[in-house]
Image (cartoon, rainbow, N blue to C red):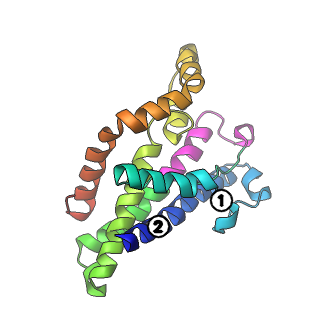
Amino acid sequence: MQIDFIFSIIILIFSVIVHEVSHGYSAYLLGDNTAKYAGRLNLNPLNHLEWFGSFILPVLSYSLGGFILGWAKPVPFNPYNLRNQKWGEAMVAIAGPLSNICIALFFGLLIRFGIAAQFGVPFVNISLMIVIINLVLATFNLVPIPPLDGSKILFSLIPYNMRYIRDFLEKNQLFLILVFIFFLWNLISPLVSLELKLITGLSI
């Protein structure tokens, strides 16, 4: 169990770093150099990790709920520098979850087609952990509550005359996040289980 937890933390750290770097590269490709000048377009953990989201929260979430959840320092970007002013912020936002989905797909398909099994049971187990953690990260980050990525996608979709929705969500974001994590987390688990079965053919 302790070995599984250690591997889970390592996988989480790598996954949240890839998630944040993907935001930065997406912004860079859309015309914003903020992340580049901040030295955040690399995979160096020292540039991305922060104590609460990268270490304390994963330990707490694993101890209390049996799942791993965490984040890295958000990669900075300036939405006013993006070439596409209408959809640019949403494109930057979705790049993070998409990176986690790609990681989950890669290792999930290794499991589904029996390739992972050729490297032994330990590799299958590690691959499965990678898939689950990245699916949890992607699904959680797509929840439309600030500051999660899903909120930025939502804000790009709602018309200006419905800005009150954005104002309400941003004003109450901490409360809404806590309510979601402590009372509505069970909504995430069935989604992750379905995604896992679709990709790997396995059930948890």
Q: Who is closer to the viewer here, 83 or 107?
A: 107
**Amino acid type shown at disc 2:** Ile
Q: Residue at x 35, y 49 (%)?
A: 65
Q: Quadrant of residue 147?
A: top right
| Disc 2 target residue | 11
Disc 2 on helix, strand or loop? Answer: helix
Residue at mark 1 to residue at mark 2: CA–CA distance: 15 Å
Please name the predominant secondary structure of the magenta segment in the image. helix
Q: Residue at x 30, y 73 (%)?
A: 125
Asked whether residue 102 is in view, the answer is yes
Q: Which label belongs to residue 89?
A: none
For the N terminus, the quadrant is bottom left
Q: Is residue 70 left or right of residue 108?
A: right
The picture places residue 16, in percent across and down from the top left corner, at 53, 58
Disc 1 on helix, strand or loop? Answer: loop
Q: Is residue 173 above or below residue 37?
A: above
The picture places residue 104, in percent across and down from the top left corner, at 38, 62
Q: Is residue 149 above or below residue 5?
A: above
Q: Is residue 135 left or right of residue 199?
A: right
Q: Is residue 96 above or below residue 82?
A: below
**Amino acid type shown at disc 1:** His
For the C terminus, the quadrant is bottom left
Q: Which label belongs to residue 48?
A: 1
The answer to whether mark 1 and mark 2 are in CB contact below 8 A is no
Asked whether residue 42 is in view, the answer is no
Q: Who is closer to the viewer here, 113 or 62?
A: 62
Question: Is 28 one of the magenta-colored residues?
Answer: no
Question: Is 95 one of the magenta-colored residues?
Answer: yes
Magenta-tinted stretch? 78-98
